[in-house]
Amino acid sequence: MISTEGAEGGGDQPCFRLEPLNAHLSGKAGETHLLYGDTDATSKVSANGVQDIEDRILRITGYYGYYPGYSSHRREEGSESRADTPGSEASGEGTSYQTCANTVLKVLGGLLLVLCVSSSWVGTTQLVQLTFKSFSCPFFVSWFSTNWNILLFPLYYGGHVVTTRDKQTPIQKFRECSRLFGEDGMTLKLFLKRTAPFSILWTLTNYLYLLALRKLTATDVSALYCCHKAFVFLLSWIVLKDRFMGVRIVAAIMAITGIVMMAYADGFHGDSIIGVALAVGSASTSALYKVLFKMFLGSASLGEVAHFLSTMGVFNLIFISFIPLILYFTKVEHWGSLSSLPWGYLCGLAGLWLVFNILVNVGVVLTYPILISIGTLLSVPGNAAVDVLKHEVIFSVVRLAATCIICLGFLLLLLPEEWDSVTLRFLAAFADKKSEEHGEELTESSINTRSRSRANGTVSIPMA
């Protein structure tokens, strides 16, 4: 810096003398400290004085929010923010990694659950046919298996005790889950009003399904039962005023087409047409059960569903037990002494049916509901494999075509409601990506053309 001083003599010319930079800066810094009375608040002066120069410029220009040591304070904040950034990035990466891990575990658990659902339903269907060889009493089998639903709520409560810290007594948990029937809980009037129609539909669904298994193969019955998904859509559209979807109408038409082809396979006569009618009736009552459940009871938690199924088991044991007795005394379903019953088959069948109900209701809560539907669909090829390998069943071309059409319609019904908009967005993004790649290719080709032209000594003149 250049400094001007007065002459020591009266007429001497002014002279110029260089002063040390640090001395001047330290003096100015002292003036700043004295002016603002700042003791420790501001930062110390650095060796090159850059902080004080910035402070003076900010003070002279009247920067809003200025105070002595502002620049050093901003530097400290910047260093702190830079120090915090790697930690925040690491925490963000940890959160995203945990989210991805949870999603992967959920999908893997869902796939395992799909195999379990499919296997349990295949085992139930095949065991029913084995039971009918020595004990052909479908209503008794249905009644006996439904009684096992009473175990669902005790099993749920056992899982609640094991997995949660806040333990509740069985009575408290029962009252909490009873809110499905209303705010006042379950009364005798509500028990009869809400449980009776669902229990009747449940019994009809199982009974018609078992009757169909006496007429058709397990593959045909399981394929026809998959039509209940189409019936649920039609009833929901008509009764619940759900959103209309053209693709689901197509799926429903495909299901009806498969039913007609299955009935036509044996020429619309004999046991085939009766078996098809029974299987379609089972699918229809199942669809009506699901639509009425959604209409009157709405969405329910896992505990409420376990409570409701156990309640239906109690209703079945108390109020429907007279029907097997009537069928026994009228010789419609006659069996010998209780010791002669195939209790091994009956208990195995009822246990597999109970496992299937547990997996379906637990799987909807723990994983994606679409996977449970896929597990039910996979029972069709599972039963087909067992029928071909063990029972040596030969399927006609018409039956195979009908089964494939029904399964394809079932898959179309699994499409989400926004599938069309999602597909259009995907196609638009794919087209944009293609156009960008094409534009990049044109740019690269033009650059290569120009470079070759320059190398050859020619100049390309753009046309107006």
Image: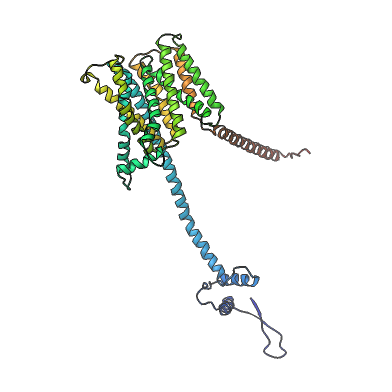
Residue 240, percent across and down? 51, 31
Camera-nearest residue between 237 and 254: 237
Asked if residue 145 is positioned above or below residue 183 in the image, the reply reads above
The part of the image, by quadrant, that contains residue 105 is top left
Taking the image as drawn, is residue 223 in sight? no
Q: How many labels does the image show?
A: 0
Query: For residue 303, which quarter of the picture?
Result: top left
Where 196 sits versus 338, above or below? below
The location of residue 318, given as percent across then percent down, is 31, 28
Nearer-the-camera pick, 372 or 69: 372
Q: Is residue 214 above or below residue 432?
A: above
Q: Depth check: 69 or 211 in front?
A: 211
- In the rendering, at what x and y percent does residue 408 appear? 48, 23
User: Taking the image as drawn, is residue 443 in sight?
Assistant: yes
Q: Above or below — where is 68 with respect to 360?
A: below
In this view, which residue lies farthest toward the right? Answer: 464
The image shows residue 123 at horizontal and vertical percentages of 33, 24
Residue at the (43%, 20%) spot, across then down: 281
